[in-house]
Image (cartoon, helix red, strand yellow):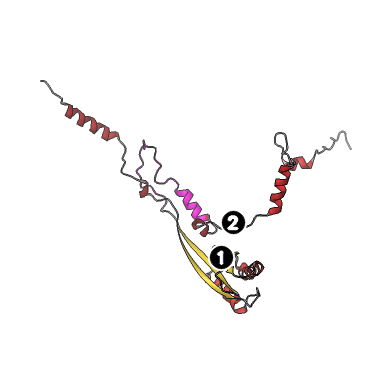
Amino acid sequence: MTINRTPLALGLAAMLLLGACAPVTSYTDAEAPRNLTTDSSTTRVDLHFAPGSAQLSPADAAKLRHLAAAGSIGAADRVTVASSGPPYVVQQRASSVSAALLPYGIVVGGTQLADVPLNHAVVEVTRTLVTLPPCPNWSKQSQPDYANAPSSNFGCATETNLGLMVANPTDLASARTLGPAAGEPAAAAVQRYLTDKVTPLPSGAGATPFSAAAGPQTAAPPTTGSP
């Protein structure tokens, strides 16, 4: 008996064999979201000051303490104070608001805005809710991946730990404004570099600045004989 194998039949057989060994490619990374999601809301509290004064009125001070005690302003919130006027007045008013909220563990930052009415201040409270990713995620089948693609659970622990440990969740939504740097230490470092007076590192294996500063130590002589 003679069997005739046509090229079409041979091609179909080869495709079936290759298809049986090929990995499943229908899975995509979109099926395993591993990113934190943030939702922020901002509330404003209006404060009044006497002309040229940075002293909070008793009513406004009581209002701030009530908001902090009720949880409307919390230590994990980003709190800023904006007011108009000369820079020293802005700083003093921010210090007054900070002094009222500091007993509740709330740190306040001060800014200067031109659109705040005269002798007024605005306290902005930004609160952010962080939603953790659905972890662990083993939606991707556990099988050999010849495309070297990451698993569906890859990165889940890192994202979850970050969402749980962040002290101020608003930092995940937007960065903070960089504050002023201390000019004197920075200028001193540049001056040492320009005059070639940089403090050299200690030499020798295991040497540290503490051991170098301590200097050599003399060991006590051994005791011999009987007392």
Secondary structure type for disc 1? strand
Please tell me which residue lies in front, 88 or 107. 88
Which of the 4 image quadrants contains residue 11?
A: top left
Which mark is drawn over residue 40? none
Place of residue 175 in the rendered image (x, y in percent of width and height, measured from the top left): 53, 56
Q: Quadrant of the N terminus?
A: top left
Depicted 153 relative to depicted 58: above or below: above
Place of residue 84 in the rendered image (x, y in percent of width and height, measured from the top left): 60, 70
Dot 1 and dot 2 residues touching (CB under 8 Å): no
In the image, farthest residue toward the bottom:
59
Please tell me which residue lies in front, 25 or 117. 117
Please tell me which residue lies in front, 41 or 136. 41
In front: label 1 or label 2: 2
Residue linked to disc 1: 79
Q: Residue at x 17, y 29 (%)?
A: 8
Q: Main secondary structure of the magenta part?
A: loop
Secondary structure type for disc 2? loop
Q: Residue at x 45, y 47 (%)?
A: 155
Q: Is residue 208 left or right of residue 176?
A: right
The segment highlighted magenta reads: 136-164
Query: Is 39 contained in the magenta span?
Result: no
Which mark is drawn over residue 178? 2
Depicted 215 relative to depicted 38: above or below: above
Q: Residue at x 55, y 74 (%)?
A: 46
Q: What type is the residue that disc 1 sits on? A: Val
Q: What type is the residue that disc 2 sits on? A: Leu
